[in-house]
Image (cartoon, coloured by chain):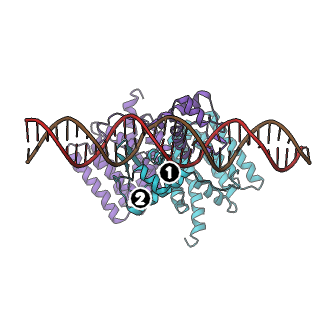
Chain colours: A purple, B cyan, C brown, D red
DNA sequence: TCGGGCCAAGTGGCTCAGCCACTAGGCCAC
DNA sequence: GTGGCCTAGTGGCTGAGCCACTTGGCCCGA
């Protein structure tokens, strides 16, 4: 990863203004429809130029959190300035249980669609990913790359770019859970077996069976994770 | 709706700059890693102030499309400046079949979770939404508002903000399909019956049953839509 | 020849001062 | 009341300018 040694985070000024604004809204309890202080006042009280305040407001504007009316002030659209759109929410590690729920919902359907729609070429891609993972596992590797390829191939075979987009949204979190899951002793070979079952259902064109196999697989992953979190459960 | 007569769209200057920048990138075939012209040059060639150019660049920055290095220029992160994240992709009507697939995947899981996690208060909310729809249907209305409330209540009861976010992403498209589906003669009362089945499963705390009932319901909606599209199928 | 340090040009970050356009609310005339 | 006007307040945008940082080439010394 080129992310290895990420140096100092030089926050742009407008980002700091953004934070101060968010804080201000929550502190003063401003609600949707309320008016923000005037740009000049904000600049003065924050000790920055109006241009920087403006940049921050433009950001809030494109995020749909705020509405600036020429000559009429700037107004809150929601009760908060926090961007909760998927991407931001998804970054937090604590949401992993939710990610796994989402993964189950999405991948189950993807497996079903893949069984019904896959072309021969796509089936071959899935088969190769499976073979790759088998080789990894037999070499004592944990098979994380093969696992990734397998799920990617299934997603592609489903021919649903919307569902694929959703998967992309939680891709980073899935990678994390994948790695952790496959670290468990005995997990790689069991995962391989589950993949094989999914593959066979897809090859047979049996959507229901593929969905069921995928559901079983994802739930296994979820269980491992939860166990390593909440030992007493 | 207050959206009824939306007057002139007064585009902010930075939005126009944004458009020109996108156009420039596609026209000149700039790729990821390439450097954008200097802010001063852009300002001069577009005939606007540097501050306006700056605002546009800040927008691109927060969207992760561009990376500005202090003293080193501004660089493209992707091959395009078009935001293709889910929201934009989702706007296109042609994707409705995919939306319905996604809806099935998401709502099935939501119903299951709702059955397992709903509080008494949330169950009451669902019940009220159901009663509201029943009243609508009995008054000869198509029950679209009750339908919306029902699904919203189930989503809330599932306690998964990630899945709720995904639903929000396709909310507009779902509304569209909902309206069209409930316009079909006999559809409202049948939809009501399906809702009732879902409610009962959730009330009983039976996740599997709730999921199955929801799947049946969403598939009915999908079928209606597809039929009205492809009569020969 | 080659390596290292220096320097200047180029570029983004930010500020300041100011003008214009538009809005909102109060006041006045009717 | 009702409608129009007027003005203070506010966002939109500009231009000039300084500072901080990056980059690449040049020069000097080994």
Report in which chain the residue with disc 2 lies: B
Q: Hey, which quadrant is residue A91 in on the image?
A: top left
Count every numbered label the image shows and give the total: 2
Name the residue that disc number 1 marks: B105
2 and 1 marks in contact (CB < 8 Å): no
Q: Nearer the viewer, mark 2 or mark 1?
A: 2
User: Which residue corresponds to the image point at 43% horizontal and 50% vertical from the top-left?
Assistant: B40
Check residue B72 in the rendering and tell me which mark sits there, or answer none.
Answer: none
Q: Hey, which quadrant is residue A43 in on the image?
A: top right
Sequence-wise first label, 2 or 1: 2
Residue B52 appearing in the image: yes
Check residue B25 in the rendering and tell me which mark sits there, or answer none.
Answer: 2
Secondary structure of the residue carrying numbered label 2: helix
Q: Nearer the viewer, residue A66 or A114?
A: A66
**Mark 1 closeness class: few <14, some 14–19, many ≥20 residues within 10 Å:** many
Report in which chain the residue with disc 1 lies: B
State whether discs 2 and 1 lie on one chain.
yes
């Amino acid at each position: 990863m080129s992310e290895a040694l990420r140096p100092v985070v030089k926050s742009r000024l407008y980002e700091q203004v953004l934070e101060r604004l968010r804080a201000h809204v929550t502190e003063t309890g401003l609600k949707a429809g309320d008016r923000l202080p005037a740009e000049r006042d904000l600049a003065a009280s924050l000790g920055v130029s109006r241009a920087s305040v403006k940049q921050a407001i433009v950001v809030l504007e494109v995020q749909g959190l705020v509405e600036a009316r020429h000559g009429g002030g700037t107004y809150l659209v929601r009760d908060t300035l926090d961007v909760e759109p998927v991407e931001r929410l998804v970054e937090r590690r604590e949401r992993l249980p939710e990610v796994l729920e989402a993964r189950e919902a999405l991948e189950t359907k993807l497996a079903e669609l893949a069984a019904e729609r896959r072309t021969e070429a796509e089936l071959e891609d899935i088969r190769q990913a499976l073979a790759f993972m088998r080789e990894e596992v037999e070499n004592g590797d944990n098979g994380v790359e093969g696992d990734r390829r397998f799920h990617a191939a299934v997603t592609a075979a489903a021919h649903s770019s919307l569902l694929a987009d959703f998967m992309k949204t939680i891709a980073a979190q899935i990678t994390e859970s994948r790695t952790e899951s496959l670290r468990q002793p005995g997990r790689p070979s069991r995962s391989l077996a589950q993949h094989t079952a999914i593959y066979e259902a897809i090859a047979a064109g049996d959507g229901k069976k593929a969905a069921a196999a995928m559901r079983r697989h994802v739930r296994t992953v979820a269980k491992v994770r939860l166990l390593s979190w909440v030992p007493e459960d």
